[in-house]
Image (cartoon, helix red, strand yellow):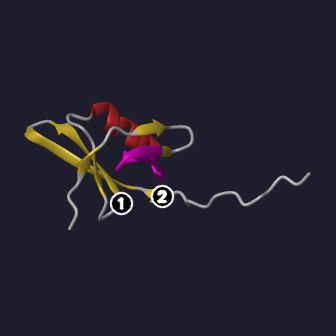
């Protein structure tokens, strides 16, 4: 079982897209609740983590009365790796 890894996500709120550099290559993911992800990332108390087993972004946020905070889990859907096949013909 793979462990979660720390990541520094690039987040585009308007397109609801998160990009993560995983093992040296950038991968793009769609999120279903972009405003919630934006709030969680803004309030994060530690580096977000990527869990490859569940394709989830784990973000720890503060909670009153709980020094450990709360881990928010956001499921991400990876964009297809399909490349264009069109060719320019002269």
Q: Where is residue 72 in the image (x, y as percent from the top left)?
A: 27, 49
Is 72 displayed left or right of 27 in the figure?
left
Is 84 displayed left or right of 74 in the figure?
right
Residue 17 lies within the magenta run? no
How far is mark 1 from mark 2, CA to CA?
A: 8 Å
Q: Where is residue 64 in the image (x, y as percent from the top left)?
A: 14, 36
Main SS, magenta residues: strand
The residue to which callout 1 is attached is 55
Mark nearer the N terminus (1 vs 2): 1
Given contact means CB atoms under 8 Å apart, are the residues at marks 1 and 2 in contact? yes
The residue to which callout 2 is attached is 78
Residue at the far right: name it: 90
Q: Give the range drawn in magenta.
A: 18-33
Indicate the secondary structure of the residue bearing disc 1.
Answer: loop
In the image, what residue occupies the spot 17% across and 38% down? Answer: 63
- Reply above or below: 73 against 63: below
Q: Where is residue 34 in the image (x, y as percent from the top left)?
A: 46, 44
User: Which quarter of the figure has residue 6?
Assistant: top left
User: Which quarter of the figure has residue 42?
Assistant: top left
Q: Which of 88 and 45 is in front in this view?
A: 88
Indicate the secondary structure of the residue bearing disc 2.
Answer: strand
């Amino acid at each position: 079982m793979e462990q979660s890894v720390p990541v520094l996500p690039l987040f585009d709120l308007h397109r609801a897209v998160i990009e993560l550099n995983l093992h040296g290559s950038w991968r793009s993911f769609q999120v279903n609740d972009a405003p919630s992800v934006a709030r969680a990332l803004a309030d994060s108390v530690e580096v977000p983590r990527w869990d490859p087993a569940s394709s989830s972004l784990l973000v720890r946020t503060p909670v009153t009365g709980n020094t450990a905070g709360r881990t928010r889990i956001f499921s991400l859907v990876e964009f297809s790796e399909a490349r264009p096949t069109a060719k320019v013909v002269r």
